[in-house]
């Protein structure tokens, strides 16, 4: 009887396992193997060993892409802190609070292409933001948000922040609503103010959720592509190119499939290492070490 139930369970899992094998595990193994070959679709692939990885170390564009991807991680702590504060603010039993929660979540369910195009128009030289700042006399000349090599990447990061804050707000809101209110009530009786309750009660209790959100937001930051593709195309002067955009450029435009696969392996290793560091940090104690 037990064997029959086990067989039925695996039969139910078979469709999902098949899709996982075909669309997840097979591309991972194939891409990893391809990173050791030179292949450009036109000619047959031939084994080159670690040559692709050595070229990455010499390629200034690849180094810049990795550097920009790591810079993109700066958005993670700001995004998480803002999301937590926002979740605390909307975690109130007030009239109309659901409307505000929905407003903050609308960017999340909006297509990233639509969001990127809208912000590209807002941040254009003759766009809405420059027009507003000029009318308020906050600036004296137009700021080239997307064409200035020094600020283009940070302008794209602003869009990622705007779109993602509502998503993590909902996750933290779910975490807040599972917390035992007795801790906060006890702290209030002892005379603790809102700031102390937030730092000493709320944040430590939210640590598992913070660990989860930090890891997935770090992975998302390292994998950012659509915003860069639509808003800047990796420019100007490759100042906003990221690892995923460089992989796309090498794979789709230059047809360097082996080299692009090697870049993907490097990015996967960076993501794995960062996820492990995050996991160890929060496991060790996070905000308050044991």
Image (cartoon, rainbow, N blue to C red):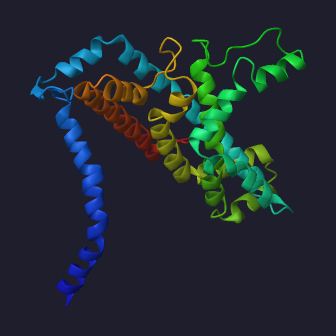
Residue at (69, 28) in percent of width and height: 121
Residue 112 in which image quadrant: top right
Percent of width and height locating residue 81: 65, 40
Q: Is residue 112 above or below residue 52?
A: below
- Res 221 seen here: yes
Residue at (69, 21) in percent of width and height: 124
Instruction: Check the picture and name the quadrant holding the N terminus.
Output: bottom left
Q: Is residue 78 above or below residue 145?
A: below
Q: Which of these two is toward me, 83 or 281? A: 83
Q: Does residue 52 appear to the left or right of 139 in the view shown?
A: left
Q: Residue furthest top?
A: 140
Q: Does residue 55 appear to the left or right of 224 in the view shown?
A: left
Q: Does residue 220 appear to the left or right of 149 in the view shown?
A: left
Q: Is residue 173 above or below residue 155?
A: below
Percent of width and height locating residue 223: 44, 35
Residue at (68, 14) in percent of width and height: 144
């Amino acid at each position: 009887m037990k064997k029959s139930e086990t067989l039925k369970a695996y039969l139910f899992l078979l469709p999902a396992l098949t899709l996982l094998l075909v669309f997840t595990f097979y591309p991972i193994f194939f891409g990893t193997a391809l990173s050791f070959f030179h292949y450009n679709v036109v000619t047959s692939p031939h084994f080159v060993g670690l040559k692709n990885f050595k070229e990455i170390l010499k390629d200034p564009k690849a180094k810049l892409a990795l550097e920009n991807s790591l810079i993109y991680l700066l958005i993670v702590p700001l995004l998480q802190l803002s999301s937590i504060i926002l979740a605390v603010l909307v975690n109130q039993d007030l009239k109309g609070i659901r409307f505000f929660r929905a407003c903050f979540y609308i960017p999340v369910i909006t297509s990233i292409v639509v969001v990127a195009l809208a912000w590209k128009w807002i941040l254009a030289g003759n766009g809405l933001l420059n027009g507003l700042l000029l009318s308020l006399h906050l600036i004296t000349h137009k700021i080239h948000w997307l064409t200035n090599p020094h600020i283009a990447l940070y302008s794209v990061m602003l869009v990622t922040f705007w779109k993602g804050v509502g998503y993590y707000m909902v996750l933290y809101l779910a975490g807040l609503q599972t917390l035992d209110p007795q801790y906060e009530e006890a702290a209030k009786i002892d005379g603790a103010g809102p700031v102390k309750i937030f730092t000493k009660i709320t944040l430590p209790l939210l640590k598992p959720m913070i660990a989860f959100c930090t890891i997935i937001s770090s992975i998302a930051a390292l994998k950012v592509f659509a915003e860069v593709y639509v808003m800047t195309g990796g420019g100007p002067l490759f100042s906003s190119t990221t690892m995923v955009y460089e992989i796309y450029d090498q794979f789709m435009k230059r047809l360097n499939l082996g080299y692009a696969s090697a870049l993907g392996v490097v990015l996967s290793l960076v993501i794995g290492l960062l996820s492990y560091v995050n996991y160890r940090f929060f496991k060790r104690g996070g905000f308050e070490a044991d």
